Image (tube, coloured by chain):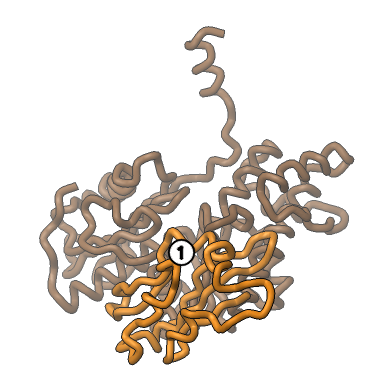
Amino acid sequence: MSETLAIADSAAKPEFWRWEETSWADPAKDWRSAKNITVGIDVGSVSSQCVVVTDGELYAYNSMRTGSSSPDSAKNAFKGVQDKTGLTLGDVHMVVGTGYGRVNVPFSHKAITEIACHARGANYMGGNSVRTILDMGGQDCKDIHCDEKGKVTNFLMNDKCAAGTGRGMEVISDLMQIPIAELGPRSFEVDQEPEAVSSVCVVFAKSEALGLLKGGYTKNKVIAAYCQAMAQRVVSLLERIGVEEGFFITGGIAKNPGVVKRIEKILGIKAMETKIDSQIAGALGAALFANTLVQKNGPLKPIAA
Amino acid sequence: MIANYGYKDGSGEYYISIDTDRCINCPAGHACLAACPKGMFETMTDDYDDEVTWIKAQFRRSLAYDCAECKPSGARPPLPCVVACTPGAIKHSW
């Protein structure tokens, strides 16, 4: 096959795992009339977000896939907001970076861990009754306890294994050739809830899923088995430090009802609801930290990207 | 804050918990740093500007192996890090 044909072939191949990138700005607000403008940049292993907070309130955000370069991902995340609102780095009073690529955000004034930022973001999104935060990220899973101010009191993270993470769900999406946004709803379209996929490891779970398909399982039934396995895996992590009332889920998997409903069923607790995109919690927390620091220390000069 | 460093895998749960509230102004002078034969502990300033101890990132995914030296399968002596931490901030899950 010629190189041109090979490229054309790969371009035509559908990417079922590719989730929708989004950007949003509050039409009722204008950053030009704000006293404090702060930005949070969350460079995660799979997705990157930029959130703009004006005077302590969410104003705009952009959520997109992380590329091979953390600095470029941070720049692109900000550019999405810039294109939508006209805001430039010169207009921003402070930038805080978070996520696994937080030290590689070229225009950030400070880096804060995603653990503290998710707690702060969840506190804003769910209110001061949030006490337990489950962050199901792209390549790790965190259980965070916080107080009424969103300050972390206890945390646990598992980033050694892809089970219970967004990347694991992407693998299954590609394997089933079903768009990732449809996995959750389709996992309920089964006559009877199947046993969970027994493999802890995503690689083995993929092999097991293939075996189930060959054994006569429908795609929906395999997805249900995988969602159940992911829920069980995450709950076992949660049980290590416990779950308090005021349960809030952040991260991309929070958008997958197939996993969320099963977690709720196992725990016997309903997760708190929010109208804000669960994937921006870390960047939102970072922007809120920046807002607090600007209120305390005054605005900072922009750092060139 | 209780910080749990470690992981869970198919073989078990391996977490070292550090109660950082007990680390602040440590009366033992962060003796855990010198007590660990692998040098797994270090002090850092956390997100709330407190100087606390944590587990170095390169050890967090291999605790079961890194701590094995202090955890013989027979009679288990007290763990050096736990003994050195007189405020009682350090706990092992396994």
Residue placed furthest toward the left:
A301
Asked which quadrant contains residue A234, the reply is bottom right
> Residue at the spot x=31%, y=48% of the render?
A74
> Vertically, is B59 above or below B42?
above
> Vertically, is A235 above or below A47?
below
Residue A114, given in percent of the width and then of the height, sits at 40, 64
Q: Is residue A173 visible?
A: yes
Label 1 sits on residue: A276
Q: Nearer the viewer, residue A244 or B87?
A: B87
Q: Nearer the viewer, residue B7 or A179?
A: B7
Residue B17, given in percent of the width and then of the height, sits at 51, 78
The kind of residue on which mark 1 rests is: Ile
> Residue at the spot x=69%, y=59% of the render?
B10
> Vertically, is A38 above or below B30?
above
> Residue at the spot x=35%, y=60% of the render?
A98
> Residue at the spot x=66%, y=49% of the render?
A202
Q: Is residue A80 visible?
A: no
Split into 4 quadrants, where in the image is the N terminus of chain A?
A: top right
Residue B37 appears left or right of A164: left
Q: Secondary structure at mark 1?
A: loop
Asked which quadrant contains residue A42, the reply is bottom left
> Vertically, is B69 above or below A66?
below
Residue A18 appears left or right of A151: right
Circle 1 residues within 10 Å: few <14, some 14–19, many ≥20: few
Residue A265, given in percent of the width and then of the height, sits at 73, 71
What chain is colored brown? A
What chain is colored orange? B
